[in-house]
Amino acid sequence: MKGLVIATHADLGASLLRACELIIGPLPNACAISVQREDDIDTVRQTFATAIAEVGRDGDGVLIMTDMLGGTPANIGGSFVDAERVDLLTGVSLPMVLKFFNSKADLGLSELALILKAYGQQGIQLISELLKR
Amino acid sequence: MKLVLARVDNRLIHGQVLEAWVPNTHANCIVVANDEIAETTMRRLLMEAAVPKGIQVVVDKVEAVAHLLCSGELGDARVLLLFATVSDALLAFRAGAPITTLNLGNMHAGAGKLKCSCTIALSPEDIDDLRTLDDSGVKIMSQCVPTEREIAWSSMLPRTEG
């Protein structure tokens, strides 16, 4: 089973996991990393390494989701990207997290990552625009 | 070229810089002076991708950046200059970078460092380098984000140090 690490500023990631659990129940192979203002970069890097090893224990790959391209969680997460084994998706949202757990288990990591990217983008809509259609 | 902010921040381009300092300073060019990242394609790409369109990004070695800033090549850009360490800032200053004010953003704790605030920890070498810059007339202030109060670096040191 693939693993998920949600790394964000403050406690956004843990809250996303809680929100997701509330909708679909317990989430296997998932964890959140919270980056605080006072955190030392090397300590955060170590936290990433531990989290990736932990949720990736099944050997099916790990997807890191982060809140913001250019933020510290994404900057550090980026250094763990490793072709088929670890990938990084920015702009995490609840639909993306839900879809991670509700996708077919036999999808490869890169296939799943592409689906989730498109799914997250579809989840952003301006309702007044929809009404004009 | 107008240098709107020169900052020491071991996170370099990150949330505070993009979402707080860029709007505050109206910078339209971010210059990262870092020997290691200048030579690491992956980190450079990630950095360049993170900056909103319309803002120029330059990543180069510290000395090359100092020369660039003096060259006039950046035209009338409003430059936000980032260093990962104080020693890089001093190197750039000595190489001619026109730094008059230095902002201390994030310099996190490590072994043997003096913790001065929640985001600033200084090693003895950092303190020496800051003294050198200070003695050369550079105004050095600690301020993580624009909404925080600026604090003169010297007032952050314990009295025996100050």
Image (cartoon, coloured by chain):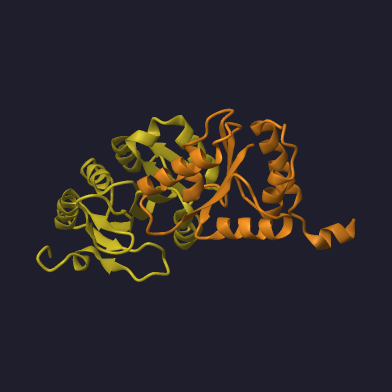
Chain colours: A orange, B yellow
**Residue B55: percent from left, percent from top:** 52, 47
Identify the residue at image location x=62%, y=59%: A18
Identify the residue at image location x=59%, y=44%: A29
State the image quarter where residue A19 is shown: bottom right
Q: Nearer the viewer, residue A35 or A90?
A: A35
Q: Nearer the viewer, residue B71 or A73?
A: A73
Left or right of A28, for residue A75: left
- The residue most toward the left is B160
- The residue most toward the bottom is B149
Identify the residue at image location x=27%, y=47%: B89
Identify the residue at image location x=53%, y=46%: B51
- The residue most toward the top is A83
Residue B28 position (above or below residue A38)? above
**Residue A30: percent from left, percent from top:** 59, 47
Can I make out residue B53 in this image?
A: no
**Residue A116: percent from left, percent from top:** 70, 42
Left or right of B140, for residue B74: right
Q: Quadrant of the C terminus of chain B?
A: bottom left
Can I make out residue A61 in this image?
A: yes
Q: Nearer the viewer, residue A3 or B117?
A: A3
**Residue B155: percent from left, percent from top:** 20, 68
Residue A1 position (above or below residue B10)? above
Q: How many marks overall?
A: 0
